[in-house]
Image: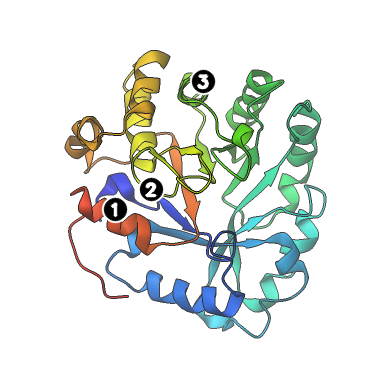
Amino acid sequence: MPALLDGLVDDAAVFPPGSAALPDALAAHRRHRNAWYADLVGPLLVPASTVAAGELTGLVDPAEGLVVGVIGDTGVGSLPFALSFLAPDGVTARQVEVAVARRGEDPLPGIAELLRVVDSLPDVEAVYAELPLTFGLMGALDALAAARADGVPVAAKFRTGGLAAELFPTPAELAAVICACRDRDLPFKLTAGLHQAVRHLDPETGFTHHGYANALAATLAAAEGDGVGRVAELLTVADPRPLLERTTGRLDAPRPLWVGFGSCSILEPLTDLIRLGLVNGGYDA
């Protein structure tokens, strides 16, 4: 697996639209972690509500060393309580992700609350504050960058799709956010809507989805100093060729800035990456 794609896809099997049952998601995740493409796969993402309900208990052998990412669906304040349920099952939370504001709300109070609880999150390597791409965004990025400079393992997370048109940022909006993170040396995650490698129209919903190959090429361009206009152009194209021009010569280098995204399917993005020639191999799962 090329270094550029290491850990690109977190396993979000239990989340919509896949909505797999937890036992099925765990079984599939174990297969992914033992497959030839294991380096592509990040942790299994589980809701904090599922963890706090003890639903992992009995499904995990404490000796297997399961690593998960916890999605704070019950809010910032409940995260320490939810994570307290993991240790007895031998499960480690590598990362925590939580929305700190709704659209139109000032994100700074939510960030302040999140920073207060970070020290109560044992063994967590990264904390992602999900920010709406609306009011107060740049101030929120400044706050996260300042906390990161002080040694707090916090970064940003942005929604790139969902069940409503307003949840899909335009290429110009997403490009501005990527460049803003670049300017602050701030890592970020993306979530929702990244169902195919290349930008496309979903005929069922009428929504135009961002592609993860577009996001990868755009992030590389930003990291190399390109401006918002060029980054937006790469997010807009529906032809994979300019995306491959940006990526194929950089496969051996670590991925800058963009931590990755969650997908309810691992094999679908893997298939797309093989078709694009960014990954060589065949399935064993």
- Evaluate if marks 3 and 1 touch, with contact meaning CB atoms under 8 Å apart: no
Against 275, is 219 above or below? above
Residue at image mark 1: 272
Which residue is at a point 27% across and 75% down the rendered structure image? 284
Coloration mode: rainbow
Q: Which residue is mark 3?
A: 180
* Of the two numbered discs 3 and 1 in the rendering, the one whose residue sits closer to the viewer: 1
Mark 2 to mark 3 CA distance (whole Å): 25 Å
Position of the N terminus, as image quadrant, is bottom left
Q: Nearer the viewer, residue 199 or 75?
A: 199
Q: Is residue 169 above or below residue 159?
A: above
Residue identifier under label 2: 196
Closer to the chain start, of discs 3 and 1, is 3
What is the secondary structure assignment of the residue under circle 3? Answer: helix
The C terminus lies in which quarter of the figure? Answer: bottom left
**Chain-order first, disc 1 or disc 2:** 2
- Asked if marks 1 and 2 touch (Cβ < 8 Å), the reply is yes
Q: Quadrant of residue 250?
A: top left
Against 268, residue 156 (above or below) is above
**Residue found at x 45% / y 75%:** 28
Left or right, 4 with reference to 77: left
Q: Along the horizontal axis of the image, is 163 left or right of 54?
A: left
Q: Is residue 129 left or right of residue 94?
A: right
